[in-house]
Amino acid sequence: GIDLNRDYAEYQQPEVKAVTGFLVRTVNEDNGKLMMGLDFHSTYDDVYYTNLETEGVELAGLENEWLNAIREGLSSHNYNPKSEQHSVTTNPSAQHWFYRQFKALGITYEIGDNTERDFIKEKAKVSADALLTLLLR
């Protein structure tokens, strides 16, 4: 009964503490840089949530390229990915945390509870292939 995606400012839930702690420790120990965070959930509808703010984000704009590639890859289904941008100051969600903590591109993808399972599998393949192609260019 707890929405873990709304705990990224309070850190009350052990799952959120574990994930955020692991990521911060790993980046610090490796003296690395986290460039993108993807968060997956289910809800009433398929939607991609992105951040309005992109200052300092090296991969800024990648989310739009990715959504366009998904649209193209699923054109036989007339699929048009629904996306919404929100300010990182509006709620403590995962994609906002990635931006605030690391200045990383943050995307939360919510799959619809009633989305056909075969379409989910096809969309997952198209989405993964498109993202890898964009990242490797």
Image (cartoon, helix red, strand yellow):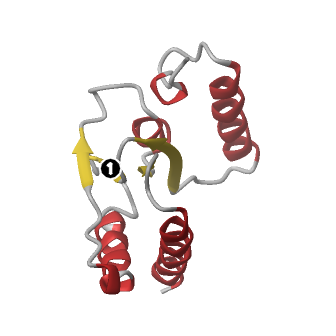
- Taking 68 as reference, is 40 left or right? right
- Taking 6 as reference, is 68 left or right? left
Residue visible at 58% across and 17% down in the picture: 11
What SS does tag 1 mark? strand
Q: Nearer the viewer, residue 115 or 15?
A: 115
Residue visible at 27% across and 27% down in the picture: 90
Please name the residue that numbered disc 1 is placed on: 50
From this viewpoint, is residue 52 visible? no
- State whether residue 106 is above or below residue 131: above
Q: For residue 118, which quarter of the picture? A: bottom right
- Taking 71 as reference, is 102 left or right? right
Location of the N terminus (image quadrant): top right
Q: For residue 129, which quarter of the picture? A: bottom right
Say which amino acid is labelled 1.
Thr
Within 10 Å of disc 1 (Cα), the crowding (few <14, some 14-19, many 20+) is many
- State whether residue 61 is above or below residue 75: above
- Residue 107 at x, y percent in the picture: 42, 51
From this viewpoint, is residue 47 visible? yes
Q: Nearer the viewer, residue 103 or 82?
A: 82
- Residue 73 at x, y percent in the picture: 39, 84
- Residue 122 at x, y percent in the picture: 52, 75
- Residue 87 at x, y percent in the picture: 24, 36
- State whether residue 109 is above or below residue 16: below
Residue visible at 28% across and 50% down in the picture: 55
